[in-house]
Amino acid sequence: MLRVAVIILAIIFCYSAVISLMDLIIPRVTMGSILKAVTGETLDSVQNTGYLKALKIAVISGGVFSLSGTIASFFILFAGFRKAQRWAWWALLVGGCVGGIGGGILPISIGDKVYSLIFIIGVVILLIGIFLPIKEFFAKPVN
């Protein structure tokens, strides 16, 4: 089960990296989704470029933080989780819940259906990957 869980988690971390890179490379996609959910307007209808610049900076900043968390998750996955070390299980559980659930609250609260779905799918797959091998982490005595 541990090997399957590592594969599942590697896939979800790649998924997260793609979303993060999308925010860095093409922030207009996220900007358009957020603006539509909050105001009902499209990016092309906004006349104030200062607002768009501020929104773009916020999206890119979020992408940077998300990418750094994803990179850290890969290190935890390959340094400890695949070796069934309890600290890695706890790190991915706590970090994944904070990042996944915390990051999903905003799109859900503003009614952004696209990003709400992206976060919900991500959190469900993450939790499957974390809980699938739980016996391998907690059935044996602590070293």
Image (cartoon, rainbow, N blue to C red):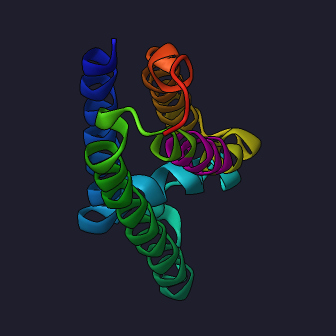
Please name the residue shown 50% across and 55% down the image: 42
Magenta region, residue range = 91-102
Please name the residue shown 54% across and 16% down the image: 139
Q: Position of residue 37 (x, y in %)?
A: 63, 46
Name the chief secondary structure element in magenta.
helix
Please name the residue shown 45% across and 68% down the image: 65
Residue situated in front as seen by the camera: 36 or 63: 63
Residue 7, by quadrant, is top left
Q: Position of residue 12 (x, y in %)?
A: 34, 33
Residue 22, by quadrant, is bottom left
Q: Position of residue 75 (x, y in %)?
A: 29, 55
Classify 62 as above or below 117: below
Q: Position of residue 59 (x, y in %)?
A: 47, 68
- For the view shown, which residue lies furthest in the bottom direction? 50
The N terminus lies in quadrant: top left
Q: Is residue 101 magenta-colored?
A: yes
- For the view shown, which residue lies furthest in the right direction? 109
